[in-house]
Image (cartoon, rainbow, N blue to C red):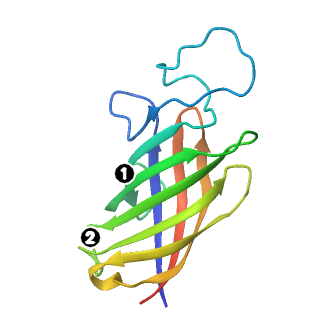
């Protein structure tokens, strides 16, 4: 079994966001006038967010970049902050450079540790199976932040 460890930097704000809401869902609660186009409105049922986040070997912005996390999340819960996540972890440095791992899962942001299933990969991780654990390192929904990722893969 191979263990991969990353820190994912998810930036929802600023001049170069790496996560962006591309489809606005609908609010299940009555609310005063809010613009569905405004990326600062609260997340809603049906929202789709595209991700293109840096993967590094440490939690700080100056840590060595080792890859990119690309994918999307769809808000699937009418209550709480629960999304379906499809994430491709593209490894760009180190012994696994040129390979990727793909994970799918239900992400409940209220859970301390979230588990997703590894459904495959490329190059060294073709036909891979395993699981991915994610936990907030320094994260909030409004601005994004850092998520710690551990992937356990059998190939």
Q: Tag 2's secondary structure?
A: loop
* Residue occupying the point 53% across, 55% down: 85
Residue extending farthest top: 33
Q: Residues within 10 Å of mark 1 (few under 14, many from 20)?
A: few
Q: Give percent across and percent down for residue 75.
A: 60, 43
In the rendered structure, the answer to whether residue 122 lies left or right of residue 129 reads left
In the rendered structure, the answer to whether residue 87 lies left or right of residue 42 reads left
* Residue occupying the point 52% across, 64% down: 104
Residue nearer the viewer, 10 or 103? 103
Report which quarter residue 34 is drawn in.
top right
Q: Where is 18 relative to 130, above or below?
A: above
* Residue occupying the point 53% across, 23% down: 40
* Residue occupying the point 50% across, 74% down: 118
Label 2 or label 1, whichever lies nearer to me, is: 2
Q: Tag 1's secondary structure?
A: loop
Residue nearer the viewer, 29 or 53? 29
Query: What is the quadrant of the C terminus in the image?
Result: bottom left
Q: Earlier in the sequence, mark 2 or mark 1?
A: 1
Q: Give percent across and percent down for residue 10.
A: 46, 45
**Tag 2 residue:** 93
Report which quarter residue 134 is drawn in.
bottom right
Q: Give percent across and percent down for residue 54.
A: 36, 53
**Tag 1 residue:** 62
């Amino acid at each position: 079994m191979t263990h991969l460890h990353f820190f994912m930097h998810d930036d929802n704000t600023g001049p170069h966001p790496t996560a962006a809401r591309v489809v606005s869902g609908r609010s299940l609660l009555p609310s005063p006038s809010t613009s569905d186009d405004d990326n600062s409105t609260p997340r809603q049922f049906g929202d789709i967010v595209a991700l293109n986040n840096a993967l590094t070997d440490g939690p700080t912005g100056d840590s060595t970049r080792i890859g990119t996390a690309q994918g999307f999340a769809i808000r699937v819960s009418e209550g709480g902050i629960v999304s379906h996540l499809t994430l491709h972890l593209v490894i760009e440095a180190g012994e696994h450079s040129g390979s990727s791992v793909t994970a799918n899962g239900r992400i409940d942001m209220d859970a301390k540790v979230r588990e997703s299933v590894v459904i495959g990969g490329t190059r060294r991780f073709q036909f891979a199976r395993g699981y991915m654990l994610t936990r907030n390192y320094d994260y909030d929904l409004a601005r994004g932040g850092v998520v710690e990722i551990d992937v356990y893969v059998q190939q």
